Image (cartoon, rainbow, N blue to C red):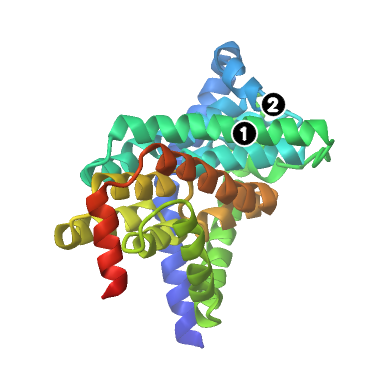
């Protein structure tokens, strides 16, 4: 048991240090932008897109950081929301669009290596996030769902532009401590999930869902791994298996569209749950949205006669 806790501590600390290298520069840049009024100046430019999703303009800074660098960069930008009133629906929408579209330059480079279009999947993730965010906003607004206010003070305390440099440093340190706790809890939860067999159960349950969207039976299991663990894992597996199984461009494109819209369901979703987002929006709704989008793409891009014959042959074998 002591060996387990030792490994957990080392793994958590190494991960925390790596993420700090991303978050701390973003926190400092946000502080500079706040003090010199750059955030207020950017508001009008960001307001139209964020307004479609019912979000304050300031959330554009958070999403923009996530888009370019990654989810934890978005966490680092959260102090920009200091003093901004948000409800649970808005927080869940922000979390969802960060989950759908983040780290685009890095992750879509993996997609490109599979032979699938870089620009196309970037646009899919960006506009997919906006469309999903707008749909959730309209539903929650129409039915008055999740309108209760949320408290983000643990993550936004460093965003007070009137705070002294010392107060800013203390608030930032507290936020980083919260992130460290989240990392430890996530690692423990992942271990429990694997040891209890929940991960395997979730994997088996996800394969039929992915098949329902129009993916063939050979590439669906690889896609499922990426859906659970991340686009880099799934994309890497598809790259490797393509050398042997020669997947069609259609099969790879649909698989990567799935991964582009929904991946890292365990870890990334856990991060947003720690933030306080609603699981029905960030997980269930996002999966349904992905299923519908990929199914539409599969319908618009019918399989070739050769692909149908190949799949029928593999079933017979």
Q: Residue 66 carries which label?
A: none
Horizontally, is 300 left or right of 173 in the view? left
- The residue closer to the viewer here, 317 or 130, is 317
> In the displayed structure, would residue 197 be above or below residue 96?
below
- The residue closer to the viewer here, 297 or 142, is 297
Horizontally, is 195 left or right of 84 in the view? left
Q: Are discs 2 and 1 less than 8 Å apart at CB?
A: yes
Residue 266 visible here: yes
Place residue 308 in its image quadrant. Answer: bottom left
Q: How many labels does the image show?
A: 2
Residue 29 picture location, percent across and down: 48, 28
Residue 178 picture location, percent across and down: 61, 54
CA gap, disc 2 and disc 1: 8 Å
Residue 261 picture location, percent across and down: 47, 44
Residue at 30% across, 64% down: 312
Residue 57 visible here: no
Q: Residues within 10 Å of mark 2 (few under 14, many from 20)?
A: many
Q: How crowded is mark 1: few (under 14 residues within 10 Å), some or many (20 or more)?
A: many
> Which quarter of the image is occupied by the C terminus?
bottom left
First in sequence: mark 2 vs mark 1: 2
Q: Mark 1 points at which residue?
A: 133
Horizontally, is 114 left or right of 15 in the view? left
Q: Name the residue under label 2.
A: 54
């Amino acid at each position: 048991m002591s060996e387990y806790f030792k490994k957990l501590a080392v793994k958590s600390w190494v991960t925390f240090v790596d993420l700090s290298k991303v978050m701390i520069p973003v926190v400092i840049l946000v502080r500079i932008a706040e003090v010199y009024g750059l955030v207020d100046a950017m508001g009008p430019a960001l307001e139209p897109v964020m307004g479609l999703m019912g979000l304050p303009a300031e959330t554009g800074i958070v999403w923009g950081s996530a888009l370019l660098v990654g989810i934890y960069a978005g966490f680092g930008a959260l102090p920009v929301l200091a003093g901004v009133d948000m409800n649970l629906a808005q927080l869940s929408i922000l979390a969802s669009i960060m989950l759908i579209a983040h780290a685009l330059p890095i992750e879509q480079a993996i997609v490109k290596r599979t032979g699938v279009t870089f620009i196309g999947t970037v646009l899919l993730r960006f506009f997919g996030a906006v469309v999903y965010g707008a749909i959730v906003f309209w539903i929650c607004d129409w039915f008055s769902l999740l309108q209760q206010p949320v408290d983000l003070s643990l993550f936004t305390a460093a965003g007070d532009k009137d705070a002294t440099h010392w107060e800013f440093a203390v608030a930032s340190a507290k936020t980083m401590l919260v992130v460290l706790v989240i990392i430890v809890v996530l690692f423990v939860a992942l271990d429990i999930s694997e040891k209890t067999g929940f991960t395997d159960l979730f994997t088996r349950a996800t394969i039929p869902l992915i098949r329902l969207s129009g993916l063939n039976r050979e590439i669906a299991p690889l896609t499922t791994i990426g859906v659970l663990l991340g686009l880099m894992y799934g994309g890497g597996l598809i790259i490797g298996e393509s050398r042997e199984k020669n997947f069609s461009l259609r099969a790879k494109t649909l698989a990567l569209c799935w991964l582009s819209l929904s991946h890292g369901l365990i870890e990334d979703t856990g991060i947003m749950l720690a933030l306080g987002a609603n699981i029905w929006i960030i997980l269930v709704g996002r999966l349904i949205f992905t299923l519908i989008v990929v199914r539409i793409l599969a319908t618009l891009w019918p399989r070739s006669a050769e692909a149908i014959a190949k799949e029928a042959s593999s079933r017979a074998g």
